[in-house]
Amino acid sequence: MFYGKKKKNDVRELLEYGGSRKWLTFLGLALSALSMLLTMIPYICIWLAARDLIAVAPDWTRAENVPQYGWMAFVFAAGGIVLYFLGLMCTHLAAFRTASNIRKQGVSHVMKAPLGYFDANASGLIRGRLDAAAADTETLLAHNLADIVGTVVLFTAMIVLMFVFDWRMGAACLLSAVISVIAMFSMMGGKNAALMAEYQAAQDRMTKAGTEYVRGIPVVKIFQQTVYSFKAFQQAIEDYSSKAEHYQADVCRGPQSVNLTFTEGAFVFLVPAALFLAPGALAGGNFAGFVTNFAFYAVFSAIISTALARIMFASAGTMLAHTSLGRINKVMEAPTLKVPKNPQRPHGNKVEFKDVSFTYDGGQNPALSHVSFTAFSGQTVALVGPSGGGKTTAASLIPRFWDASSGSVEVGGVDVRQIDPHVLMDQVAFVFQNSRLFKASVLENVRAARPGATRDQVLEALKAAQCQDILEKLPEGMDTQIGTEGTYLSGGEQQRIALARAILKDAPIVVLDEATAFADPENEVLIQKAFATLTKGRTVIMIAHRLSTVVGADKIIVLKEGRVAEAGTHAELTAAGGLYARMWADYNQAAQWKLASEKEAE
Ligand code: ADP
Ligand code: MG
């Protein structure tokens, strides 16, 4: 009666997150139902007292039971409050556990997602979804369900009381309650549900457009594109405004007026009914009983109003259940990295791509198609080529940021998908262009690669990564917190700290995405030195943007539009006169220009 079939399942699904405390929700609901029954008993006591008093009027002293009824009313009212309190305690305990389980299970699921998942789904977004879902679920389970159960009990009891006292006056009270409930749900059901969905969708679009607008402010400022950027946002606002107006005026106005009128005036039918019945009661000779019944319903109609008002909020809560569950499921839908049942150990440090193709989720063209190459143990293989050629994608497949769509990536002769992820992570160190540092000390940042490392080992790695100058200028050396109180590091400096991290890890295979963005001359020299330390004696897959770094590579793979366009050593490729030879010529020309302009500047 109070919520559709679909929503009931949503609530049930949410309850599953309660785990071992799920039963507390049911206990809490039972207590809350019982409390509603107890709360109603004082009204019956009032009726009993009124009946006795009227029977002996005006000789009041003969109504000996009245004090007893008073005490009964007090005890039951107090008992009702205590039970309500206990019930809410149970539902809260369950709700808190449920909310914390939603967070825990969401996070532990996301932990199993391949690293690449976090490129598309920022961790802030994931956290936001879980937080919102947990908060809404908390309100629903702690308060709303108990209120719904209380109201159901109230309605049932009203029907029973109708027959106990005067069914005609009871029916009059019930009638106004029924009208207000029908009006309330007519706003939500059928065709109106679709309208409401549209209204909510318009609201979502407006929020998104607003976020986009704020995000785009720098672009708007630089390119003076106010008109265009406003347009989408303005349209979303206007759309929302017209949907909201339509929904309020055409759907809600009538039913809501009826609902509020009958919620607040539960007695509107009671008074006419009483007037209509009065002559009959007078003639029948039991006018005293009639007056007592009327007094009972007149007082009782007050709880009906309260209960109806509560159920309004409660039904909004059950609607939240649907959105909450949607958010949770969105997080739970994150793909998980498949863990091998019988993991195999890699033999040696060879890295081999065997006919590898890969298409991003939702991508039109494959980012890699039929790529094959081998980096033997201790060799350096460079990936070069035009932007968008697939270099970063190829490198990401080695530590399983993604898994190949077809073909296989092998480390030590074993498909990476057959290696225990921990073993693979121990074997491979990677430094990507956008190596992020945590908001922690330099020490913690580097030590993340090997939690057992001593301070001296971390310091050694930092030295090998040419970070002495960074440590010297930081106020507390390697204990300085990064990103707080003005201790920001330049891109080149961050890259060197990331290199220290990789050096400390001391993995036999290194995957490097060289950073061109940070090519200020001072950093460049230092980064090159750090590279040299990191790559010595290891198998290296290096993405190089400055071709000067690849001249000495054992093998150069030229990737273009996801395919291997050319492969060979520097000497072979320059002699072949293909794409690489052209890139090399361009590179040298650019280098000469740079040299010339630097000379001029001197
Ligand atoms: P490169 O590193 O050589 O510049 P990438 O490997 O980054 O090239 O990109 C190869 C292709 O894959 C490009 O067409 C790029 O647009 C696409 N691509 C890269 N990352 C993603 C992603 N996360 N989702 C969808 N497509 C992507
Ligand atoms: Mg790249």
Image (tube, helix red, strand yellow):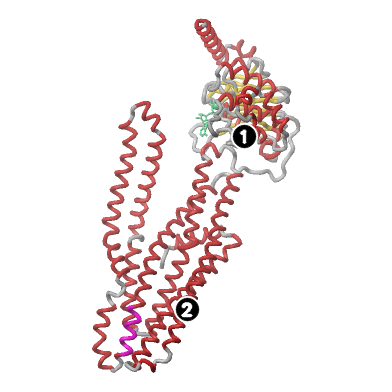
* x 72%, y 35%: residue: 453
- Is the N terminus in the top left, top right, bottom left or bottom right quadrant? bottom left
* SS class, disc 2: helix
Whether residue 3 sits left or right of residue 241 in the image: it is right
Name the residue nearer the viewer: 47 or 191: 47
Whether label 1 lies within 8 Å of ligand 2 gets the answer: no
Give the magenta-colored segment's residue range.
Answer: 288-298
Q: Position of residue 315 (x, y in %)?
A: 41, 62
In the rendered view, tell whether residue 443 sits above or below residue 285: above
The total of numbered circles placed on residues is 2
Is residue 132 magenta-colored?
Answer: no
Q: Quadrant of residue 311?
A: bottom left
**Residue farthest along the front direction in this orientation:** 61
Majority SS type along the magenta span: helix
Quadrant of residue 382 within the rendered picture: top right
Q: Is label 2 within 8 A of ligand 1 (CB to nearest ligand atom)?
A: no
| Residue designated by label 2 | 76
Note whether residue 37 is visible: no
Tell me which amino acid carries mark 1: Ser
Sort mark 1 into few (<14), some (14-19) or many (20+) by Cα contacts within 10 Å: some
Say whether disc 2 or disc 1 marks the residue closer to the N-terminus: 2
Please name whichever residue, 526 or 580, is drawn nearer the observer in this view of the structure.
526
SS for callout 1: loop
Q: Position of residue 326 (x, y in %)?
A: 48, 52
Position of residue 264 measured from the top left corner of the image (x, y, whole percent): 31, 69
Say which of 482 and 580 sits in front. 482
| Residue at 25% across, 79% down | 272
Q: Which residue is mark 1?
A: 441
Q: Quadrant of ligand 2?
A: top right
Q: Is residue 547 visible?
A: yes
Disc 2 and disc 1 in contact, CB within 8 angstroms: no
Say left or right for 436 vs 208: right
